[in-house]
Image: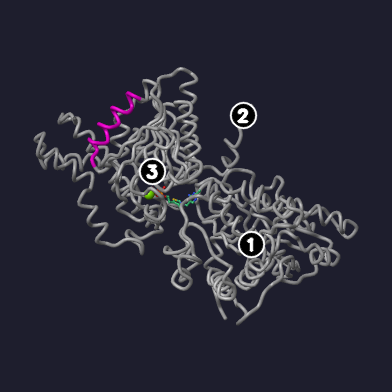
């Protein structure tokens, strides 16, 4: 069935909440407003305000509350209106959610999903346009998921909700309205499995979330110019499915990694390091990265466009990786 | 008591009218896609910025949240440069890098608009700390919505301001909603949000935020006290947002009724002041016509300036990321 990314997320949570009454949703405007981006449309009507909890603007407070509730056996889904506001809750996420199992010697667990949109939309300015996945991936104790399609969004969110760990689930404002085929009925997609989104022989292009769409478009364009590009979406950023990527690299010998986040200490640097360690001998040239520019996101349109990877930049990077002009 | 000088009242009215017409024009420009991103209008709340800032010296500090056009214009910023910033142009206050939510005009001591709710309140205490430290007799005025009051950052800032007797005036613009959440569902002591400050020993009072003279009267008294070193003060200005939360939100939404909005519009701050002027200082309709014409010309000129200005050069993407050595 054809669903939007937004509807797919809505279905995933709805199905899981029907299945398990320990699951509740908490965040700003999730209830009566129907979600800041209307992801939780109809939830408060179906599940009531006990399970669909509107909060004051207190990210640290309600994230901490959810962590406590998870320690006591509930399965909270925390909606951050955007991932940018997760910074306000970062102490709770890093110092509590990620470490409580470890520090307690495995006595406690924090089954929790923290979800919301990351990355830039259109001209929302520096405080509302950040791609912070590398921050979360850095922290032992967290899983990080960033689906690009409705099918993946639904299947991965269901798995994230069933997971016994804190999972940071990163969506994207510009993906909410995108549509795609979604399997009818019950299914899940395991965390930690990449997917080959397009097969090719010449070069491996790794991209996730919104950048997957840019990568696919670039691959399409390159195919008309005679380059056969394999596109891989890790889908789960941590734990990373390196095997799928390395299998592809062994076939193609060339790699380009695309991410919207900042270059310095970005996720692509880690993925490149992992590939170099696992498959250096198979590489025919250096790995090329396409990233966001290392600046706070400017508001002005031409500057914002200059700061975010786009199809021409990915095309150029793939060509340079393949040594064609 | 309010002093009833004709020119004085004309000047207050003119400032509120400028904000009103400027923002109505911004909404139009948004519909034409000249302005993008988030645009939060201050329409209905003008009396607070104008009344409060009228009680300040030009060297006092003003800082605000993302609903900041009113504060910036009341501080005396050039409407053309403000509009150019909303357009993302190189001639904007921040050369297009800030946008609507992040206006800054250092020359006017307008220290910025900030888009992480609660996040700028500690900055205000810092400005006040600096002026106390440097033995300057400055006050800092910090505007925020009632939705920021429950945030942890607000509370930490209140405590520090009280602890160190900092010369800061917290002005809570209680427009009764944070996005779609009414204050009753966000603040425990919603009937008296100033208790949040009182609990730290900060003196507080409530004022009719639709009455520019009332706001200025309270502020004159408070500014003197705070400037004299008596520590911070909290003012709860009761107001109402006539438009939606941002351009993405219709003017009444699901969370309030048309009737409720209409009821509050009866106490439009422009109407309230106009009645006083017609009745008490012998202003005539002709005076208002003249003001409309003058302000209309200013706004038209601002749009023309913004429209004719160039977009920033993409080469400026990396300027001002770091201080130059
Ligand atoms: C930390 C944080 N959480 C959430 C948001 C999203 N958000 C933007 S404005 C807003 C409501 C704020 O209400 P209030 O403080 O009353 O100000 P008003 O918009 O009414 O002027 C919310 C939830 C944000 N910008 N920052
Ligand atoms: Mg409010």
The residue segment tinted magenta is B211-225
Residue B11 occupies quadrant: top left
Q: Quadrant of the C terminus of chain B?
A: top right
Q: Whole-Å distance between the Cαs marked 1 and 2?
A: 35 Å
Secondary structure under the numbered disc 1 in the rendered image:
loop
Circle 1 residue: A209
Q: Nearer the viewer, residue A305 or A37?
A: A37
Position of residue B57 relative to residue A49, above or below, is above
Which residue in the rendered view is the most extreme toward the top? B135
Q: Position of residue B211 (x, y in %)?
A: 23, 40
Position of residue A215 relative to residue B214, above or below, is below
Circle 3 residue: B83
The label number, if any, that marks residue B324 in the structure image: 2
Q: Position of residue B3 (x, y in %)?
A: 17, 29
Front label number (1 vs 2): 1
Task: Give the side of residue A93 with respect to residue B155, left or right.
Answer: right
> Earlier along the polypeptide chain: callout 2 or callout 3?
3
Task: Name the main secondary structure of what is drawn in magenta.
Answer: helix
Q: Chain of mark 2?
A: B
Front label number (3 vs 1): 1
Residue B288 occupies quadrant: top left
Q: Position of residue A282 (x, y in %)?
A: 88, 60
Q: Chain of mark 3?
A: B
Secondary structure under the numbered disc 3 in the rendered image:
helix
Position of residue A76 relative to residue A102, above or below, is below
Q: Nearer the viewer, residue A136 or B42?
A: A136
């Amino acid at each position: 069935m054809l669903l939007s990314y937004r509807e797919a997320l809505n279905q995933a949570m709805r199905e899981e909440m029907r299945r398990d009454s320990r699951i509740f949703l908490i965040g700003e405007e999730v209830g009566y407003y129907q979600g800041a981006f209307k992801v939780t449309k109809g939830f408060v009507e179906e599940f009531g305000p006990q399970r669909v909890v509107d909060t004051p603007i207190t990210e640290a407070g309600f994230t901490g509350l959810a962590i406590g509730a998870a320690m006591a056996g509930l399965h909270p889904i925390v909606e951050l209106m955007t991932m940018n506001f997760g910074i306000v809750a970062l102490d709770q996420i890093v110092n509590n959610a990620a470490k409580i199992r470890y520090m307690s010697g495995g006595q406690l667990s924090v089954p929790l999903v923290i979800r919301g949109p990351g990355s830039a939309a259109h001209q929302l300015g520096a405080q509302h346009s950040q791609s912070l996945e590398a921050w979360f991936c850095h922290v032992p104790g967290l899983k990080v998921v960033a689906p690009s399609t409705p099918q993946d969004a639904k299947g991965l969110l269901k798995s994230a909700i069933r997971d016994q760990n804190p999972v940071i689930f990163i969506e994207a404002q510009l993906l909410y309205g995108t549509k795609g085929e979604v399997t009818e009925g019950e299914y899940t997609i395991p965390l930690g499995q990449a997917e080959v989104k397009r097969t090719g022989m010449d070069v491996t292009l790794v991209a996730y979330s919104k950048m997957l769409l840019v990568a696919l478009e670039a691959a399409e364009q390159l195919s008309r110019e005679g380059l056969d590009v394999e596109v891989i979406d890790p889908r789960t950023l941590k734990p990373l499915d390196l095997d799928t990527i390395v299998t592809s690299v062994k076939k193609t010998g060339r790699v380009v990694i695309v991410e919207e986040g900042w270059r310095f200490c970005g996720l692509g640097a880690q993925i490149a390091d992992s590939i170099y360690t696992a498959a250096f001998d198979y590489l025919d040239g250096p790995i090329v990265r396409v990233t966001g520019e290392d600046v706070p996101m400017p508001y002005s349109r031409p500057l914002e466009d200059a700061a975010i990877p786009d199809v021409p930049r990915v095309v150029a990077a793939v060509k340079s990786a393949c040594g064609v002009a | 008591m309010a002093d009833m000088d004709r020119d004085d009242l004309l000047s207050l009215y003119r400032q509120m009218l400028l904000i009103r017409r400027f923002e109505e024009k911004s909404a139009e420009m948004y519909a034409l896609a000249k302005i993008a991103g988030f645009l939060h209008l201050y329409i209905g709340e003008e009396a607070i910025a104008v009344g409060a800032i009228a009680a300040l010296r030009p060297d006092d500090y003003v800082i605000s949240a993302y609903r900041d056009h009113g504060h910036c214009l009341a501080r005396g910023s050039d409407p053309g440069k403000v509009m150019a910033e909303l357009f993302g142009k190189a001639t904007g206050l921040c050369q297009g890098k800030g946008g609507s939510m992040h206006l800054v005009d250092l020359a006017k001591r307008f220290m910025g608009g900030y888009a992480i709710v609660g996040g700028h309140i500690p900055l205000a205490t810092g400005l006040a700390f600096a002026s106390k430290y440097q033995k300057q007799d400055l006050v800092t005025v910090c505007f925020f919505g009632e939705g920021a009051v429950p945030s942890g950052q607000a509370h930490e800032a209140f405590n520090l301001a009280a602890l160190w007797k900092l010369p800061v005036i917290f002005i809570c613009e209680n427009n009764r909603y944070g996005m779609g959440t009414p204050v009753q569902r966000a603040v425990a002591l919603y009937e008296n949000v100033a208790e949040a400050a009182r609990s730290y020993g900060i003196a507080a009072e409530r004022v009719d935020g639709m009455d520019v003279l009332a706001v200025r009267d309270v502020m004159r008294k408070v500014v003197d006290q705070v400037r004299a070193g008596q520590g911070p003060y909290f003012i709860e200005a009761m107001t109402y947002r006539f438009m939606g939360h941002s351009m993405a939100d219709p003017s009444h939404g699901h969370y309030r009724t048309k009737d409720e909005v209409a009821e509050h519009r009866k106490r439009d701050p422009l109407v309230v002041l106009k009645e006083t002027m017609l009745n008490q200082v012998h202003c005539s309709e002709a005076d208002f016509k003249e003001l409309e014409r003058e302000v209309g010309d200013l706004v038209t000129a601002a749009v023309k300036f913004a429209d004719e200005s160039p977009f920033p050069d993409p080469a400026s993407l990396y300027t001002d990321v770091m201080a130059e050595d």
